């Protein structure tokens, strides 16, 4: 992600399985204005409800949260 106008914090969440259970990180990565960064989360850094299994083949949706008030560019999302 690249913060164009002002700095921002970013985090990801995923929905998994047939029930579309919500799982999210909680480390909110800071990116300063005019710079870029890669927000990376391992599966063990994403919290899911009790009994929900998180794995690449179970991901049904990816959500990107940004809190900037300015322009931000996202250029790639991938799950491995």
Image (cartoon, rainbow, N blue to C red):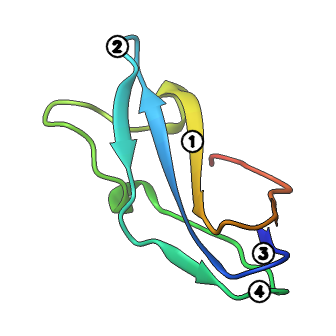
- Which one is in front in this view, the residue at disc 2 or the one at disc 1? 1
62, above or below 38, in the image: above
Q: Residues within 10 Å of mark 2 (few under 14, many from 20)?
A: few
20, above or below 54, in the image: above
Q: In this view, does 79 lie to the left or right of 20?
A: right
Circle 4 — which element?
loop
- Name which of mark 2 and mark 1 comes first in the sequence: 2
Cα gap from disc 4 to disc 2, whole angstroms? 38 Å
59, above or below 37, in the image: above
Q: How crowded is mark 4: few (under 14 residues within 10 Å), some or many (20 or more)?
A: some
* Residue topped by disc 3: 3
Circle 2 — which element?
loop
Cα gap from disc 1 to disc 3, whole angstroms? 17 Å
- Name which of mark 1 and mark 3 comes first in the sequence: 3
Q: Where is residue 36 in the image (x, y as percent from the top left)?
A: 79, 80
Cα gap from disc 4 to disc 3, whole angstroms? 5 Å
* Residue topped by disc 2: 19
- Name which of mark 1 and mark 4 comes first in the sequence: 4
Residue at 80 percent across and 57 percent down: it is 74
- Name which of mark 4 and mark 2 comes first in the sequence: 2
- Name which of mark 4 and mark 3 comes first in the sequence: 3
In what quadrant of the picture does the N terminus appear?
bottom right
- Which one is in front in this view, the residue at disc 3 or the one at disc 2? 3
Q: Is residue 10 left or right of residue 1?
A: left
């Amino acid at each position: 992600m690249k913060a164009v106008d002002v700095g921002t914090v970013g985090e990801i969440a995923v929905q998994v399985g047939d029930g579309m259970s919500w799982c999210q990180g909680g480390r909110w990565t800071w990116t300063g204005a005019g710079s870029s960064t890669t927000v990376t989360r391992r599966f063990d850094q994403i919290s899911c409800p009790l009994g929900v299994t998180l794995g690449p083949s179970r991901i049904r949706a990816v959500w990107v949260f940004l809190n900037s008030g300015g322009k931000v560019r996202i250029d790639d999302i991938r799950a491995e």
